[in-house]
Image (cartoon, rainbow, N blue to C red):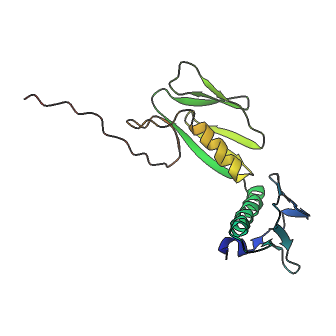
Amino acid sequence: MSKIGQQSITVSPTVTVTIEDVNVTVKGKEGVVSFTLPSGIRCEKDATTNEYHVVRRNDTKEMKSLHGLWRSLIANAVKGVEKPWEKKLEVVGTGFNVKMQGEDLVFKVGYSHPVVFKKVDAIKFAVDGNTKITISGVDKQLVGEIAHKIKMIKKPDAYKGKGIKYEGEKLRIKPGKKAKAAA
């Protein structure tokens, strides 16, 4: 049995969930997230409380996997439209920085040219100082995906840790080569 799929999704009064056949739309003060459920998965509202349940058609391995997945996706959407999801990144290195240019991010991370990261719909960027970036939005998956793409502009170096990393991420720094002692 899917333990995650069996849990109910509690919805606050400020969030509206609309179910039309296989389409689920979640609206809140921060935005809107829409899903099309796969065949065999349904979302139902509990008549007495403001809770929703995700129900599967049968107990095949695939249905059990989809059951837990779609329950998590809908629950994340309910949380995201109430309070946006955030990822924080840091730019580490001498002379490395990031700036906002309109709604785009401009990185100077050791290349011969500045790297421009264009604005993505439904995602907000914020820059603290010259080295901290906050990525926020209602879709948890999209926020994580954009944060990863930004990190891949300049992955942290294995020897000095210079590059773009998640805030609080612990890097394993390799020791450098040691000089041989004179014999």
Q: Which of 20 and 75 is in front in this view?
A: 20
As drawn, is 162 to the left or to the right of 136?
left
* Residue 7 in view, yes or no: no
In the image, taking residue 3 as reference, residue 45 lies left or right, namely: right
Residue 36 versus residue 160: which sits nearer the camera?
36
Quadrant of the rendered image containing residue 79 = bottom right
Residue extending farthest front: 60
Looking at the image, can residue 76 be seen?
A: yes
- Residue at 57% of width from left, 33% of height from top? 153
User: Height in image: 75 above or below 129?
Assistant: below
**For residue 3, side relative to residue 131 (left or right):** right
**Residue 101's x, y, as percent?**
69, 27
Residue at horizontal 55 percent and vertical 35 percent from the top: 131
- Observer-nearest of 40 and 21: 40
Q: Indicate the quadrant containing the C terminus: top left, top right, bottom left or bottom right.
A: top left
* Extreme residue toward the left, this view: 183
Name the quarter where the N terminus is drawn. Answer: bottom right
All told, the count of numbered labels is 0
Rendered view: 11 above or below 157: below
